[in-house]
Image (tube, grey):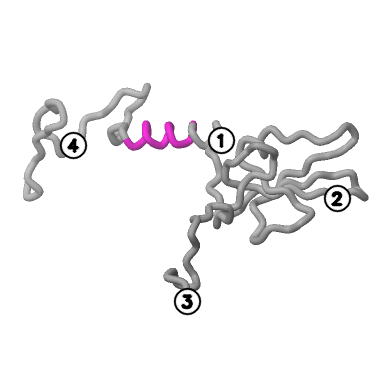
Amino acid sequence: MGSRRGPLKSAVPSNVVSPVRRCSRTACGRPAVATLTYVYADSTAVLGPLATYAEPHCYDLCAEHSERLTAPRGWEVVRLLDSSAPARPSGDDLEALANAVREAARPPDRATGPGGARTADPREVAPRRGHLRVLRSPDN
């Protein structure tokens, strides 16, 4: 006799296999974001972007463990940047952005006379009032 269940169905659902790669550290279940490998001949640990597939001699690490990674005494840690990830802005970038915003908000400079005093626009009939000004007709 055949089973009432189809051939592909299981009596107990399984969550053992996950499509998301997890951190290799013991008791850490966070998603992996970086891959660690060792170059024993150079005493170097290389931490780079997550490898495209899991290798048996590499370790996948989550963000927290990859940031806190240290190497044994005498070893060097090489951190490869992920070129696909957006770069974090530096202090210079933020300062340049703030200066650009200030410059864009500043009213356009008018011609300045000797000593830095502003001269009146020859087309103006009356003094400025706030952001409004009265101009002569182009025919005059």
Is any atom of residue 71 visible in this view? yes
Inter-mark Cα distance, 3 to 2: 55 Å
Tell me if residue 34 comes above or below residue 108 in the rendering: below
Residue at the image position 41 percent from the left and 37 percent from the top: 100
User: Tag 4: residue type?
Assistant: Pro
Magenta stretch in the rendered image: 95-104
Does the magenta portion include 98? yes
Rendering coords of residue 75 (x, y %):
87, 38
Question: Mark 1 or mark 3: which is in front?
Answer: 3
The residue tagged 4 is 122
Between disc 1 and disc 3, whose residue precedes?
3
Q: Would residue 133 be found to the left or right of residue 40 on screen? A: left
Depth order, front residue of 111/12: 12
Question: Mark 3 or mark 2: which is in front?
Answer: 3
Question: Mark 2 or mark 4: which is in front?
Answer: 2
Residue at the image position 64 percent from the left and 60 percent from the top: 52
Depth order, front residue of 57/109: 57
Inter-mark Cα distance, 2 to 4: 75 Å
Between disc 4 and disc 1, whose residue precedes?
1
